[in-house]
Image (cartoon, rainbow, N blue to C red):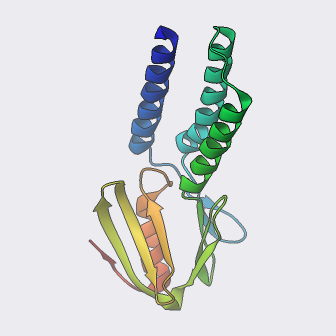
Amino acid sequence: MLTLQHLVIGLITVVIVLDLCSQFTKGRAKQTADGVEFRLKPLVRISIVFVPSYLLWTWWVLHSQGYPLPWWFTVPIAVITIASTLIRSPGMIRLTPTAAMQRSWLLPSKQIAYEDVMTIRSEMTRNGSATLVRGSTRVNIVHWHGRHSAADEFRAEMEKRTGKRVVS
């Protein structure tokens, strides 16, 4: 049982370190032919791959140490972990010449035309700081500062493209 405790402590430590390190990096926006892209920070992308890989490695260690876990228990846990990781990942934001778009892995894409933007709010939530773009069509696009790159540049671009000021 000591091995399981070490593996759980290791997972928690690595996830906390990755999350804290991603808060301290700014990242960069990428200019493409379609517009400006605000991707997930590299450390966030690493954690999306790392957490399921760590769980698979944990299963292998436990299995080789004599703690056999049945497949009917292991497979659903792995699928749920991967799906929840992909659903929770905020996706990429692209500012095209006509609209702001957010594309996620398993969720439908969102799009707000610049003329439909009602407010741009910079707020502090329990999940961290974010810039929330609200559209008149009840569509919201959220730029999470801890997960997306170039928060200041995103706010400046949204102000320039919509003509609205960011409200704190």
Task: Give the farthest residue toward the left.
Answer: 168
**Quarter containing the C terminus:** bottom left
**Which of these two is toward me, 133 or 160?**
133
Q: Is residue 77 left or right of residue 150?
A: right
* Residue 59 position (above or below residue 151): above
Quarter of the rendering containing residue 99: bottom right
Residue 130 x %, y %: 38, 62
Name the residue: 60% across, 42% down. 81
Residue 136 x %, y %: 47, 90
Q: Could you tell me how many numbered marks the image carries?
A: 0
Residue 54 x %, y %: 60, 27
Name the residue: 45% across, 41% down. 22
Q: Is residue 66 left or right of residue 167?
A: right
**Which of these two is toward me, 39 or 127?**
127
Quarter of the rendering containing residue 92: bottom right
**Which of these two is toward me, 96 or 79?**
79
Residue 149 x %, y %: 50, 54
Q: Is residue 144 left or right of residue 112?
A: left
* Residue 155 position (above or below residue 42): below
Name the residue: 62% across, 38% down. 77
Q: Is residue 110 left or right of residue 20?
A: right
Name the residue: 51% across, 80% down. 139
